[in-house]
Image: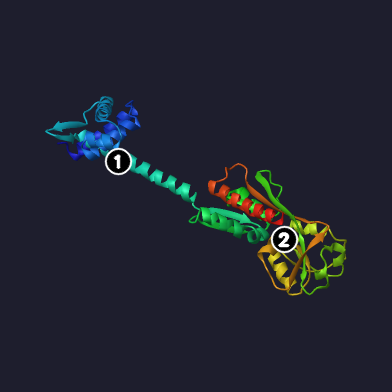
Amino acid sequence: MRSNSSLQGLHADLICSARTGVVMDFKQIETFRSVMQTRSMTVSAASLHTSQPNISRLIAKLERGLGFELFRRVGLRLVPTPEAEALYLEVQRSFVGLAAIKEIADTIRELGTGGLKIAASPALSIGVLPPALQLFRQRRPDTGVTVHTSDSATVCKWTSSGFCDFGLASYVSDMPELAVELLHQENGLCVVPSDHRLARKRRIAASDLDGEHFISLAGADRSRAEIDAAFKPDRRRLTLETPYATTICTMVSLGLGVSVVNPLVIRRLPLPNLTARPFSPAVEFRCYSVRAGHRLLPVLAAEFLDCVRDVFDTRRRGRG
């Protein structure tokens, strides 16, 4: 019987042999591991779905490659040699590592790389993400999702830097490193209090808002510039502004003014005393998906974007 120090030396010799030309394929190692566990070539053949002679050939080939004996017959028993015991310790470490890798791969397949991080502009975080998340939950009920909300320029920066897996932006900054897709576009609606004189009109023109208190998006928002371009200068009374369309709609419902907003927000935010009408000239509101162009889109992110597209497709069919 070898001492512990002898087995440690043998272990070092095995590593050295592996570095100097011993060739062992996975099938041989898998067979060796099974025979070590079962102490039977017949039982191992059944568990590996092969024949007993094939198991014997693989073990013999492994022994020739290693240069030492692995098993001896003692009566009816198959007994591993001390060299086999030393080799088995290293094989077990490797298989435990492979099992851990497989477990990680299964987790990635089921849950992704630790959850999904989405960036979205305020209007899209309320107008698109909730129904898309509802669809996504049906497919991936256990996946963690974090939503970061800011203006579209920040959404683009978060996505470009890799802080978020992808973003939903109302407009796109001039960043060539971004991959951009237009998902949806729709004309804005004019919102007025339900008891307002314009609430009875079927369509509200820019000139109808002359002299009205107008609640604007914040000055840095690109949609603000497009809305302002629809009006003649100094015809409106610009007394309030906020970066959030939800806040605008709430203010309008309280009689603080009128505005033009993204229709996605109105659909998700039913408020009393709020009437929405088509507006002319047309002011388009858009939804873009953005991601870092140098990075592949994670599987979970691609699935979530499919849910966003489904939401828009459903709405388009509903309007049609």
Residue 19: percent from the left, percent from the top? 34, 29
Task: Assess whether mark 2 and mark 1 are in contact (beta carbons under 8 angstroms).
Answer: no
Q: Residue at x 57, y 47 (%)?
A: 302
Q: How far is mark 1 from mark 2, CA to CA?
A: 61 Å
Q: How many marks?
A: 2
Element under disc 2:
helix
Q: Report the front residue among 288 and 138.
A: 138
Q: For the residue carrying disc 1, how many other residues have a C-alpha within 10 Å: few (<14), some (14-19), or many (20+)?
A: few
Q: Quadrant of the N terminus?
A: top left
Residue 20: percent from the left, percent from the top? 33, 26
Element under disc 1:
helix
The tag earlier along the polypeptide, 1 or 2, is: 1
Label of residue 92 in the image? 1
Residue where numbered disc 2 is placed: 263
Q: Is residue 52 above or below residue 147?
A: above
Report which quarter residue 223 is drawn in. Answer: bottom right
Q: Quadrant of the C terminus?
A: bottom right
Say which amino acid is labelled 1.
Gln
Q: Is residue 128 left or right of residue 94?
A: right
Q: Report the front residue among 54 and 19.
A: 54
Residue 168: percent from the left, percent from the top? 64, 53
Q: How is the image coloured?
A: rainbow
